[in-house]
Amino acid sequence: MDTIWRTPDELWQLVETILEREYPRHPHDRRRADLRCVLDGIIYKLRTGCQWNALPKEFGDDSTVHRHFQAWCEKGILQKIWAELAEACALAGQVDFEWQSADGSLGKARGVPKKKRKKKASGQTRPTGPKQG
């Protein structure tokens, strides 16, 4: 099976029903971003590891994609999508649950204090021992 870069129609139908149920349109929204395009942008970002502001313009505004990604994570929508996809694939006999793996990536540790360094005396340094001549 090829790597998914764009959401296929069959997959989008499943995702769209989940989004309609879990992430309904606000009644006062004038316009809403194309959620299929947003999902494609999230897939692209997660597959490539690029920064949000490096998303190609074809996925829409990077801050819009990121905002939806944060909201979907906060509401557990991505987990619900994953669970329903895994269930649908399992029912179709497409998943071998004996062989599963997860990939994690390492990133810069945030919020870890740096060791405090002693300030050097400005100007001259202290001698470390007697001079040998």
Image (spheres, helix red, strand yellow):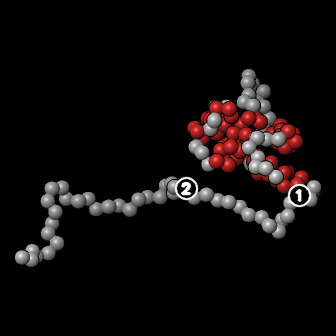
Extreme residue toward the left, this view? 133
- Name the residue at 68% across, 43% down: 44
- Name the residue at 77% across, 36% down: 36
Q: Nearer the viewer, residue 133 or 67?
A: 133
Residue 45 falls left or right of residue 20 = left
Extreme residue toward the right, this view? 92
The answer to whether residue 6 is visible is yes
Disc 2 to disc 1: CB gap under 8 Å: no
The answer to whether residue 18 is visible is no
Residue 95 falls left or right of residue 77 = right
Q: Nearer the viewer, residue 60 or 48?
A: 48
Instruction: Kindly report which numbered mark, 2 or 1, lies closer to the viewer in this rendering.
Output: 1
Name which of mark 2 and mark 1 comes first in the sequence. 1
Q: Position of residue 72 (x, y in %)?
A: 72, 43
Q: Position of residue 101 (x, y in %)?
A: 74, 63
- Name the residue at 62% across, 48% down: 49
**SS label for mark 1:** loop
**Which quadrant of the view contains residue 121?**
bottom left
**Which residue position is annotated with label 1?**
94
The residue under label 1 is which amino acid type?
Gln
Mark carried by residue 107:
2
Q: Where is residue 58 in the image (x, y as percent from the top left)?
A: 68, 32
Residue 112 falls left or right of residue 77 = left
The residue under label 2 is which amino acid type?
Gly
**Which quadrant of the view contains residue 27?**
top right
Between the residue at mark 2 and the residue at mark 1, the CA separation in whole angstroms equals 33 Å
